[in-house]
Amino acid sequence: MRNIQEEMSELLKNYRKEMQQELENILSYWIKYSIDLRNGGFYGKINNTNKIQEDAPKGSVLNSRILWTFSAAYNLTKRPYYLQTAERAFKYINSYFIDKEFDGVYWTVDYSRTAADTRKQIYALAFAIYGLSEYYKASEDERAKQLAINLYKAIIKHSYDKVYGGYFEAFTRDWKEISDFRLSAKDSNEKKSMNTHLHILEGFANLYLIWPDVVLKQQIVELINIFLTRIIDAETNHLVLFFDERWNRKSSTISFGHDIEAAWLVQEAAEIIQDEELAEKVKVRSLEVAEAVARGLDTDGGLWYEKDVAQNHLIKEKHWWPQAEAMVGFYNAYQISGDPSFLERSWNSWKFVQQYILDEKDGEWFWGINEDYTIMQGEDKVGLWKCPYHNGRACIEIIKRVVVE
């Protein structure tokens, strides 16, 4: 009989191999279906059955995520057509999403490349920094590096809260105050959010890899400490989602996907700036968050979407992106702890995706499933929020992390 070590070694070999194949599958889908040859860039919307809506608005977040994904895939595999796709995304962002007059990026442009929603959502600037920094690693195009630095400086100048710390959510095109801060209709209309801070940290950390600026490092340290002291609840180990200006809590909902995403992204940021003491502190919290998230797993290995604690109501949907983040977050917890139960949770997340989320017929991943395992209707394969970043990144992270002897 094989011992446990042999079984784990076999599982890891299979995991890495399957991630290599799935990464290729995901990116092949985006190359085949999402490229808009008529109007440039990428289509703004493709539905579950791959029907393209040619006149759909195009989102800066989607395009920045495409830029990051194909740049990161090239950096991993060195396949030229991944870099070519990343270059397409960069040219479109540089030409049409960058606000040449007031700095920052537009939230959307219409299909004909005209600015549509011109609000300055800091979340969008953060993703542009993330994508541009990764593209610079792949291309060494100085324009991408300078754009990323300029966007970072715009965030510091306009969004940084010099009184209470952290960053405000949104502004008008010319950086005036705005009444609606929300990323989407489901969000609370508050001045500060976990989500925006997580992705500012993600973008700043990736920028630091190509531009190790002293002040940028200080901003990253401050953001990590905000997560440790403000955003991660000391008692529940779940993330608080919304805050007012003074960091008073304004929500009681648990987002299991954001919890497990933060569990590895905050740690990665501390490791990127090579702050060993801070990284060790974050690792402790990462494990605690991962343990808390595990309570949101169903018996089938899937991760539930959200829980409204105030109403004691579990939203019994399983969306695509929390499963992808669970693959990475639980694997990260396994790397920290050596506890095989975390490896099992990561692997089970992938097996769940294979069984219920992967579209074997038309490609890519469905948005999600309902409690009865039916596919969620009316959602996108490609859209303002549906992208190759979560699932593509999960594949890339597992490939990089799994050491096969």
Image (spheres, rainbow, N blue to C red):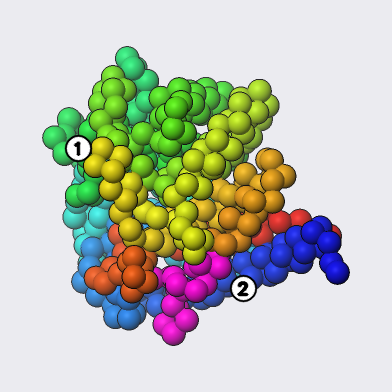
* Element at label 2: helix
Q: How many C-alpha atoms fall within 10 Å of the one at disc 1: few (<14), some, or many (≥20)? A: some
Amino acid beneath label 1: Asn
Whether residue 387 sits left or right of residue 163 in the image: it is right
The residue positioned 45% from the left and 42% from the top of the image is 259
Instruction: Depth check: give the residue in front, 2 or 125.
Output: 2
Q: From the image, which quarter does the N terminus lie in?
A: bottom right
Horizontally, residue 75 falls left or right of residue 128, namely right
- Look at the image and give the residue range highlighted in magenta: 350-366
Q: Are marks 1 and 2 in contact (CB under 8 Å)?
A: no
| 1 or 2: tag closer to the N-terminus | 2
Residue 21 is tagged as 2
Closer to us: 126 or 360: 360
- Looking at the picture, how far across and down is residue 354, in whole percent? 52, 72
Instruction: Please report the residue visible at 31 percent of the width from the left and 23 percent of the height from the top.
Output: 247
Q: CA distance from mark 1 to mark 2?
A: 41 Å
Is residue 400 depicted above or below 366 in this figure? Answer: above
Residue 21 at what x, y percent from top left? 62, 73
Any magenta on residue 356?
Answer: yes
**Residue farthest along the left direction in this orientation:** 179
- Residue 110 appears anywhere in the view: yes
Quadrant showing the C terminus: bottom right
| Picture layout, residue 404 above or below residue 101 | below
Tag 1 secondary structure: loop
Residue 266 image position (x, y, % from top left): 53, 36
Residue 189 numbered tag: 1
